[in-house]
Amino acid sequence: MKRENDSKKKKDMDKTLIEITVIGKDRKGVVAEITNFIFKNEGNIEKINQNVVRGLFGMQLEASFNKVIQDQLNSGLKILAKNLKMEIKVHYQEPNRLPNIAVLVSNEEHCLLRILESYDKNELKANIPIIIASSENLKAIVKKYGITFVVVDHKDQFQAEKEILELFEDFNIDLVVLARYMRILTPNFVWRYPNKIINIHPSLLPAFPGAFAYVQAYERGAKIVGCTAHFVTEDLDQGPIICQNSFKVSDHDDVESIKRKGRKLESSTLLQALKLYLDGKLEVYWGKVHNKNNKKTR
């Protein structure tokens, strides 16, 4: 039995896994065209997910190949994209390479600092080649760690996302972490990284959504407040929950003390979620996050 398992593992390692993302105006026949292309190139479809929002079609597909000629595959997909009038991106997974993480931030430093401290101690099984911010405020912090810091501050979200996606391609990004990034991502962006964008929300979702969660909790007299790390979907803060943590509110707490406790918990919870992902312990099915050891994450 052990030899059989070892043989299967070796075969799986010999395979090349690719991710294909398709984005564009909804039209008939797209799924059939893409899947037929995979089959004709002797690939096997492992996962496929598609969605349509307000006429925008998005599909993410994973396929495995025993043998891949990248130039041939890239050329074929380029022709297919032109024929379908769609944007098609392909990402080749390299099993022996550490994943590349892009961290997106705005003005608050607590979550970013916790991630950078952990990264500096070699506690993360990943590279962080770039941090993208919507302002200059955190530049000095990032500079100390020698990581590329880029400001993308377009008021128009489409233009901002276009520039960010180009940076992702340049840095071969595998995972995105929103460390209190205070801009709403569009479906056009989110669909490109299904279950690969991790966000921290200052609330035990779905209660008290929005930027003033702790103020709402205080005003409503909440006795327990907390935060939620989750995958981002086109439904904003309704994505699959990775982990949640909370703290008790005493009669002596005010808004500022709740904020201090909340920010400390946000940073540790986001880091917890990131480590679970990088350790390969998470999988998503039926809209929920499950531990691969069949133990639910908190």
Image: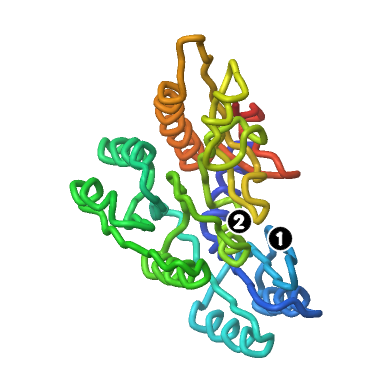
Type of amino acid at the residue the image marks with label 2: Pro
Type of amino acid at the residue the image marks with label 1: Asn
Residue shown at the point (60%, 56%) measured from the top left: 194
Q: Position of residue 274 (x, y in %)?
A: 46, 40
Which residue is at the far left?
Answer: 144
- Marks 2/1: CA–CA distance: 9 Å
Q: Are marks 2 and 1 in contact (CB under 8 Å)?
A: yes
Which quadrant of the figure contains the C terminus?
top right
Q: Is residue 177 visible?
A: no
Which residue is at the far front?
Answer: 219
Quick one: label 2 or label 1, which is nearer the N terminus?
1
Q: Position of residue 50 (x, y in %)?
A: 73, 63
Q: Nearer the viewer, residue 46 or 149?
A: 149
Q: Report whether 104 appears left or right of 92.
A: left
Residue shown at the point (72%, 44%) measured from the top left: 287
Q: Nearer the viewer, residue 89 or 16?
A: 89
**Residue at which label 2 appears:** 194
Q: Position of residue 220 (x, y in %)?
A: 62, 23
Q: Which mark is residue 49?
A: 1
Residue shown at the point (57%, 29%) measured from the top left: 244
